[in-house]
């Protein structure tokens, strides 16, 4: 019989190591496990009844995370709340965490800051563990229980509908600067994610409940029609509700406005705090919600200017160089330091393809319109007059 007291002490060490982000301590734990310990952990991982009890414990954590996402109004608040949830999760599933760490090769130690700064596409599972996604692979993503939770094909993840599941659980897909990626949700909705974007969504939509996802960054949605279960996208303070349509949302934290451009169908935009006050958007129009003024303005636009990024196109129409720099940093995964202040206010109209043209080619083209000099060192570009 394995020494339970010792196992739980090891579990406590694991929980504290996760909380503190101490990877060296985690590696040291491996040497403390004997054969009986390993057999006990594997049994806890594979026994169905024990698994059911663990899942009951996680349900409350899932509900807490979903509720917090609805209330989320800023990055700072999100970080604090996730930290608290992660600590609770680590304490309650410490024994299971041991088996995660030592027996599931593809699962990394949960660390939100590390994942968001990474230059690889990352998938955060419902338990907080993080997996790296190779965009060129065709395989299945396996959770810590050995279950295939999502299929993978080149350029996209694909979730299947499971009518036997009746509890919401969430995955979170992060696409870093310099990359684009897609996900097909369990209802068939296609979401194209732009560089530097994060989407949180249910692994499985449940019939009779609203379909809700949470976005930070930019994405183009092709929503599967389902009149009985409305689809909503939340971007912090703004919500977008649809039944079946195609639209683009840009909600980068550094941008002053959250913009929604409609390609097909119709959507309703509203403040999360006051859902009764909404604006209806029709195809060929853009709604811009100002973060400071808390107001929505609607204008007619050329939709292609706002959706070309899906195919790798960068389109600048009467755009200041200051705004162009923001887009270049995200699309090419570079840092640009501009010491030419007058250049920031210059207006340019141009189009490029990030998959076919380098950042040097793009800058050289802009130099023909307005001369300046630049140097490149690794991923840092310095512009001078």
Image (cartoon, rainbow, N blue to C red):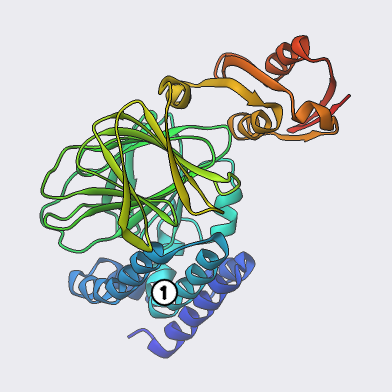
Position in image of residue 234 (x %, y %): 37, 52
Count of numbered tags:
1
55 versus 245 height, above or below: below
Q: Secondary structure at mark 1?
A: helix
Depth check, front residue: 223 or 161: 223
Classify 67 as above or below 202. below
> In which image quadrant can residue 345 be found?
top right
In the displayed structure, does residue 36 sit left or right of residue 332?
left
Residue 198 percent coordinates (x, y)? 46, 47
Q: Position of residue 346 (x, y in %)?
A: 74, 24
Residue at 30% across, 28% down: 283
Looking at this rendering, what residue extends furthest in the bottom direction? 5
125 over 157 or under it: above or below: below
* Residue at which label 1 appears: 89
Foreground of the two, 358 or 310: 310
- The part of the image, by quadrant, that contains residue 314 is top right
Check the picture and name the quadrant holding the C terminus. top right
């Amino acid at each position: 019989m394995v020494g339970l007291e010792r196992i739980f002490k090891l579990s406590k060490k694991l929980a504290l190591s996760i909380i503190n982000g101490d990877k060296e301590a985690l590696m040291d734990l491996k040497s403390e496990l004997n054969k009986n310990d390993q057999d006990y952990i594997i049994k806890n991982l594979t026994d169905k009844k024990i698994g059911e009890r663990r899942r009951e414990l996680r349900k409350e954590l899932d509900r807490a995370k979903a509720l917090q996402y609805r209330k989320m109004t800023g990055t700072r608040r999100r970080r604090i709340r996730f930290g608290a949830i992660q600590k609770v999760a680590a304490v309650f599933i410490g024994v299971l965490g041991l088996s995660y760490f030592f027996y599931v090769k593809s699962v990394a130690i949960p660390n939100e800051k590390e994942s968001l700064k990474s230059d690889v596409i990352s998938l955060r599972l419902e338990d907080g563990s993080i997996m790296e996604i190779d965009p060129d692979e065709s395989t299945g993503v396996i959770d810590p229980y050995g279950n295939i939770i999502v299929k993978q094909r080149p350029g996209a993840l694909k979730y299947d509908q499971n009518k036997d599941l009746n509890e919401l659980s969430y995955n979170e897909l992060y696409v870093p600067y310099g990359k684009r990626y897609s996900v097909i949700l369990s209802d068939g909705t296609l979401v194209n994610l732009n560089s530097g974007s994060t989407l949180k969504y249910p692994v499985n939509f449940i019939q009779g409940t609203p379909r809700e996802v949470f976005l930070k960054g930019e994405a183009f949605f092709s929503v599967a029609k389902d009149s009985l279960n409305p689809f909503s996208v939340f971007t912090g303070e703004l919500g977008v509700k649809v039944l079946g349509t195609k639209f683009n949302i840009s909600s980068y934290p550094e941008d002053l406005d959250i913009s929604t451009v409609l390609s097909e169908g119709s959507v309703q935009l509203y403040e999360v705090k006051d859902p009764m006050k909404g604006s209806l958007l029709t195809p060929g129009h853009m709604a811009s919600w100002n973060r400071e003024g808390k107001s929505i303005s609607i204008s007619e636009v050329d939709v292609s200017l706002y959706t070309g990024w899906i195919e790798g196109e960068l389109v600048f129409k009467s755009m200041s160089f200051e705004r162009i720099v923001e887009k270049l940093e995200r699309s090419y995964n570079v840092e640009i330091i501009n010491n030419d202040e007058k250049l920031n206010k210059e207006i340019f109209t141009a189009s490029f393809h990030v998959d076919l043209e380098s950042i040097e080619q793009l800058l050289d083209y802009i130099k023909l319109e307005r001369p300046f000099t630049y140097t490149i060192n690794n991923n840092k570009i310095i512009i001078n007059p």
